[in-house]
């Protein structure tokens, strides 16, 4: 193991600075020589989870747990994957197990708070994030506290807390998105747009950052905002989701076409068929259009003086 240990340490450092692809490569090399290392499997699960490769992440997380059922880190990895798979109860069980195994570790408490936020229970989430903050007042815990304040309607407090995080870590994705939404709620749309662009530039694959930018677009112009939302939805979805969606739309269009023909509206049925073909073509080019529009928006983004 000693000869491959540097690969594991390098992967840890790469994860800390967001270089997940490099971390995955180094963890793969390390696990090839050390397949019984539960912690390495859990780290791999977290990297794959970050890249939205959820099936592979689940496999690695379960492998970690099978090797060491008492590893809190492995339980957190399993919980994160379950949460992304929209299985909050399974996620909560893993996070609670991790918290019981490592009561002085703040991460399980923070993850439990996220589950309660998912359930729309910010008051309960606040209880857990406050316990996490008591253990470690790091940027992630303080950014989550700001998020919870925003959900509770404490907009000024959320903005202030997010800015405090950003003064220490200007690229913190969660703090940027909280700040952007807080600014939007105060109708400070120009500032919200700048914040959204900076969030996307720092984390181009972050769903929260993209959602903030789409919210800004909707506020600026509801009509073009819906075009952005459609493009983003088509661009971010898996090929399977796109195909299933197209099949669903096709069935609806087909039923509508037959009904129009039966009631003597043949020209309208023909137009609807052409519209369907147009949407099929659009579904393939929308991801490209979205990336081009996003790149144009990012061309002039600059870090504001308040950061």
Image: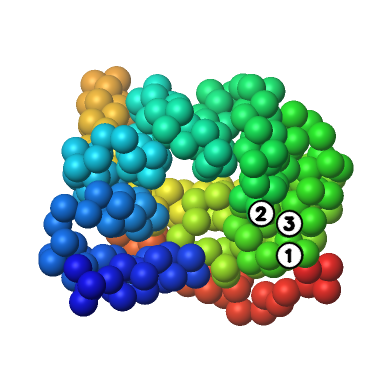
Say what secondary structure mark 2 lies in: helix
Q: Is residue 293 visible in the rendered structure shown here?
A: no
- Tell me the SS state at disc 1: helix
Q: Quadrant of residue 235?
A: bottom left
* Circles 1 and 3 in contact, beta carbons < 8 Å: yes
The residues tagged by marks 2 and 3 sit, at their Cα atoms, a distance apart of: 6 Å
Name the residue tied to disc 1.
168
Task: Give the alpha-carbon distance from disc 1 to disc 3, as whole Å.
Answer: 6 Å
Residue 229 appears in the rendering: yes
Do the residues under discs 2 and 1 have CB atoms within 8 angstroms?
Answer: yes
Spatial CA span between label 2 and label 1: 8 Å
Proximity of marks 2 and 3: CB atoms separated by less than 8 Å: yes
Dot 3: few (<14), some (14–19), or many (≥20) neighbours within 10 Å? many
Q: Residue, x 24% and y 45% (percent of image)?
A: 64
Which residue in the rendered view is the most extreme toward the front?
Answer: 2
Point out residue 242 in the picture as x, y percentages from the top left corner: 28, 46
Split into 4 quadrants, where in the image is the N terminus?
A: bottom left
Q: Secondary structure at mark 3?
A: helix
**Neighbour tally class for label 2: few under 14, some 14-19, many 20 plus, Cα within 10 Å:** some
* Residue bearing the label numbered 3: 165
Q: Is residue 222 left or right of residue 205?
A: right
């Amino acid at each position: 193991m000693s000869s491959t240990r540097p690969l594991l340490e390098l992967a840890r450092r790469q994860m800390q600075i967001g270089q997940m692809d490099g971390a995955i490569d180094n963890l793969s090399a390390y696990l090839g020589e050390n397949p019984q290392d539960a912690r390495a499997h859990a780290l791999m699960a977290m990297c794959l989870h970050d890249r939205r490769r959820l099936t592979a992440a689940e496999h690695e997380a379960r492998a970690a747990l099978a090797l060491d059922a008492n590893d809190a880190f492995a339980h957190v990895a399993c919980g994160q994957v379950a949460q992304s798979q929209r299985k909050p109860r399974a996620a909560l069980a893993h996070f609670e197990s991790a918290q019981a195994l490592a009561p002085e570790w703040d991460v399980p408490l923070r993850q439990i708070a996220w589950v309660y936020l998912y359930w729309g229970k910010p008051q309960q989430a606040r209880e857990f994030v406050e316990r996490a903050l008591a253990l470690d007042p790091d940027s992630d815990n303080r950014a989550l506290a700001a998020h919870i304040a925003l959900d509770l309607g404490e907009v000024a407090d959320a903005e202030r807390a997010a800015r405090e995080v950003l003064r220490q870590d200007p690229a913190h994705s969660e703090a940027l998105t909280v700040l952007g939404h807080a600014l939007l709620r105060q109708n400070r749309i120009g500032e919200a747009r700048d914040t959204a662009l900076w969030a996307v530039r720092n984390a181009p694959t972050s769903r929260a950052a993209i959602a903030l930018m789409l919210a800004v677009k909707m506020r600026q112009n509801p009509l073009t905002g819906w075009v952005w939302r459609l493009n983003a939805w088509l661009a971010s979805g898996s090929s399977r989701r796109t195909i299933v969606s197209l099949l669903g739309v096709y069935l609806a269009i087909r039923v509508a076409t037959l009904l129009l023909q039966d009631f003597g509206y043949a020209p309208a049925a023909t137009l609807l068929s052409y519209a369907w073909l147009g949407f099929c073509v659009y579904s393939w080019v929308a991801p490209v259009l979205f990336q081009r529009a996003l790149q144009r928006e990012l061309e002039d983004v600059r870090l504001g003086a308040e950061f």
